[in-house]
Image: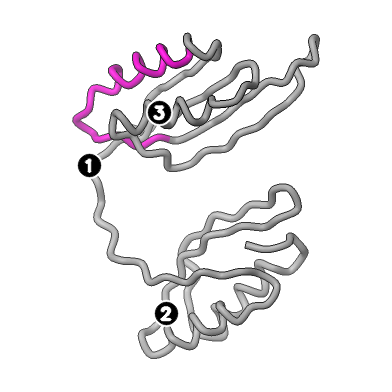
Amino acid sequence: IGKDEPGLVRLIADIVSQHDGSWLESRMSQLAGRFAGIVVVETSDDKLAALKAALLDLEVISSVVEEAEHVELKNSRMLDMNIVGPDRPGIVHEVTRALEQHVANVVDMETHISAAPMSGELTFSADATVEVPFEMDWQTLADKLDAVALELGIDILLEEEPDQ
């Protein structure tokens, strides 16, 4: 995490390359003048300590370096969730509370506030990917989210990702 400026990703890539690392996966974003990113890198055991030290020594960003454990494939399905409605405090709180109660995990979420075209009122919108156990009847979760939507005066659409 750090102040956004050109060259940050290249700087990280340089360090990974200098330690014979392989850039496997990443998620990076700029928001409100700040840069944040998560990178999964693979390198040999004998270069790991030096790679960690070099990343932690970067002065332009604050880094946290962790060794990832082996990730086991889950028997789960992904659902797309879309939320739209008048902005008000508590939308993300109430929706994520309902998701947690049904063992649903937010894998990815992007939110926005914008002015409605005619009225100028602030509108909240979110697009998310939610992971649920494969054997779960996700319609039960959809019904719970419908109740939350009704209570908050918003629309929540939950549907299975097309490739499942």
**Mark 2 or mark 3, which is nearer the start of the sequence?**
2
Question: Residue placed at 47% from the left, 18% from the top?
Answer: 157
Q: Secondary structure at mark 3?
A: loop
**Magenta-colored stretch includes residue 5:** no
Examine the rendered structure and indicate whether residue 47 appears above or below residue 72: below
Looking at marks 1 and 3 on the same chain, the residue that comes earlier in the sequence is marked by 1
Relative image position of residue 89 (x, y in whole percent)? 59, 25
Answer few, some or many: residues within 10 Å of disc 1's Cα (few below 14, many 20 plus, some between 14 and 19): few
Which residue carries the number 1 mark? 75
Which quadrant is home to the N terminus? bottom right
The furthest residue to the bottom: 46
Q: Position of residue 66 (x, y in %)?
A: 42, 70
Front disc: 1 or 3: 1
For the C terminus, which image quadrant? top left
- Percent position (x, y) of residue 135? 19, 30
Q: Which residue is mark 2?
A: 43
Kindly report the distance in space between the C-alpha atoms of the residues bearing marks 3 and 2.
35 Å
Mark-to-mark CA distance, 1 and 3? 17 Å
Q: Which residue is mark 3?
A: 162
The span shown in magenta is 130-149
Q: Position of residue 107 (x, y in %)?
A: 43, 42
Considering the numbered disc 2 on the image, is that residue within a helix, a strand or a loop?
Answer: loop
Res. 160 image quadrant? top left
- Count of marks overlaid on the render: 3
Decide if residue 131 is on the left or right side of residue 157.
left
Q: Nearer the viewer, residue 76 or 56?
A: 56
